[in-house]
Amino acid sequence: MRFSPGPLAAVLLVALAACTPALDWRQAHLEGSGVAMLFPCRPDRHERAVRLAGTDLRMQMHSCHAANASFSLTYVDSAQPAQVGALLDELRGRTVANIAGVGAVRPFAVPGTTPNERSALLRIEGRLPDGRSVTEHAAFFVKGLRVYQASAIGEAVSAETVETFFGAIKVMP
């Protein structure tokens, strides 16, 4: 009797896929950002010009998608200290408006950041342009003249995932 490895190999592949975690947490030292944090997937780096608080700025983003959710760290550099508050306000406002949402706000602080009363963690319930319901968790914080936004958005982002993602943010000295 001859043994065929085909069916056994297929069963092993299915078993291995079932054991692969949906969130593969990894420490990411995000080039140029001054931040290290955990991402549940390998983030890609993007850059674009934006107009925020009446100023043309270069926005940089590190983002990835895992377990039906998107995770990102975005940052912009202000030209002057007086502009930092306006940038935080506009980023927060755009985040809520992007998903036509309503949300809860709580204080958020990352060790090593510049204290700012507008730094916060938002939990926003809203809808995507296609009508699907989503929840976005977004943290806003500052280091010097750099304004950051970390986000996790999806149909169902668990409390454990939110805690892991936002709790691991470290600002480099």
Image (tube, rainbow, N blue to C red):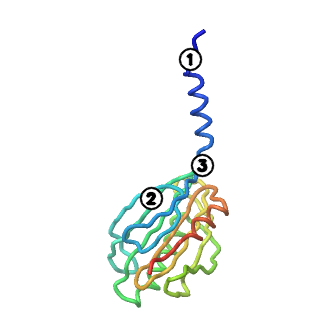
Q: Please state, as top left, top right, bottom left or bottom right, where the N terminus lies in the image.
A: top right
Disc number at residue 21?
A: 3
Q: Please state, as top left, top right, bottom left or bottom right, where the C terminus lies in the image.
A: bottom left
Q: Which residue is mark 2?
A: 43
**Residue count near mark 1 (Cα–Cα under 10 Å), binned few <14, some 14–19, many ≥20:** few
Disc 3 element: loop
Give the Cα distance between marks 1 and 3: 30 Å
Q: Residue at x 62, y 61 (%)?
A: 161
Residue 72 or 136: which is nearer the viewer?
A: 72
Q: Amino acid at mark 3?
A: Pro
Examine the image and state in which quarter residue 61 appears: bottom left
Given the current orientation, which residue lies at the most extreme right position?
Answer: 159
Disc 1 element: loop
Up-down relation of residue 8 to residue 71 (above or below): above
Q: Residue at x 58, y 49 (%)?
A: 22
Q: Amino acid at mark 2?
A: Pro
If you read the primary sequence from the N terminus, does the residue marked by circle 2 or circle 1 appear first?
1
Left or right position of 118 against 61: right
Q: Residue at x 59, y 22 (%)?
A: 7
If you read the primary sequence from the N terminus, does the residue marked by circle 3 or circle 2 appear first?
3
Q: Which residue is mark 1?
A: 4
Residue 102 location, x and y as percent?
62, 70
In this view, the mark in front (3 or 2) = 3
**Residue count near mark 2 (Cα–Cα under 10 Å), binned few <14, some 14–19, many ≥20:** some
Q: Amino acid at mark 1?
A: Ser
Q: Residue at x 55, y 79 (%)?
A: 110
Residue 77 location, x and y as percent?
37, 79
Up-down relation of residue 131 to residue 164 (above or below): above
